[in-house]
């Protein structure tokens, strides 16, 4: 279990950075379209973190069909057991032609569950941690396992203590 209080590295992400990286992900995915015409059938956004990157990628890739895969594995401070709340009903070819997008792959638990249901889908995220890298097909940036990424929807502007002044844990 990852606990925010014991995490050594905080990594705040701005809206602009997230948007730029989601566009970069779309750029990579455009080149990998599996269908005869090089296109994708649609996107499955892993809620909630994958919704913003999925929307940006969908716009950039001109994809209009977006489904949601609602799975919960985090609370505010830790990662725990994953629970499926809602899954898309994609019977065709185990998800072939679909992209499953999340903001981050940490340990790979969410993507492992999704891959059991949709083994032929393409799994993509913006940020990947080492333990999760084997479960993802495309990502933009790898960060260390002890990094806690603070996404813009979870932040508000406030004073930040300089790194050199923070106590070492």
Image (cartoon, helix red, strand yellow):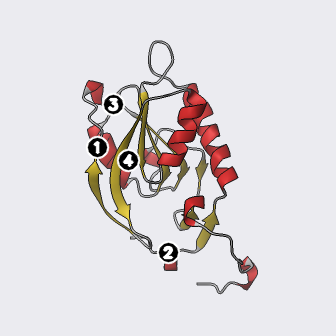
The CA distance from mark 2 to mark 4 is 22 Å
Task: Identify residue for label 3.
Answer: 95
Image spot of residue 7 (x, y percent): 53, 74
Residue at 42% x, 24% y is: 41
Residue at 32% x, 44% y is: 114
Task: Identify residue for label 4.
Answer: 111
**Mark positioned earlier in the residue sequence (3 or 4):** 3
Q: Relative to the observer, which residue lies in front, 5 or 70?
A: 70
Image spot of residue 121 (x, y percent): 38, 33
Task: Identify residue for label 2.
Answer: 4
Single out the mark in the foreground, 3 or 4: 3
Task: Identify residue for label 1.
Answer: 87
Question: Does the CB distance between marks 1 and 4 fall below 8 Å?
Answer: no
10 Å crowding of disc 4: few (<14), some (14-19), many (20+): many
10 Å crowding of disc 1: few (<14), some (14-19), many (20+): some
Single out the mark in the foreground, 3 or 1: 1
């Amino acid at each position: 279990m990852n606990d925010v209080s014991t995490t050594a590295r905080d990594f705040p992400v701005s809206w602009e950075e997230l948007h730029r990286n989601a566009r970069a992900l779309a750029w990579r995915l455009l080149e990998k379209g599996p269908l005869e015409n090089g296109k994708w059938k649609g996107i499955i956004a892993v809620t909630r973190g994958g919704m913003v990157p999925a929307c940006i990628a969908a716009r950039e890739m001109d994809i209009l069909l977006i489904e949601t895969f609602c799975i919960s594995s985090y609370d505010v401070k830790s990662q725990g057991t994953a629970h499926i709340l809602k899954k898309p009903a994609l019977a065709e070819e185990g998800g072939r032609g679909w992209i499953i997008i999340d903001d981050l792959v940490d340990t790979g638990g969410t993507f492992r569950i999704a891959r059991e249901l949709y083994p032929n889908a393409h799994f993509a995220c913006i940020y990947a941690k080492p333990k999760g890298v084997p479960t993802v097909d495309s990502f933009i940036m790898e960060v260390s396992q002890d990094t806690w990424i603070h996404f813009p929807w979870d932040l508000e502007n406030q004073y930040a203590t300089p790194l050199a002044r923070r106590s070492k844990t």
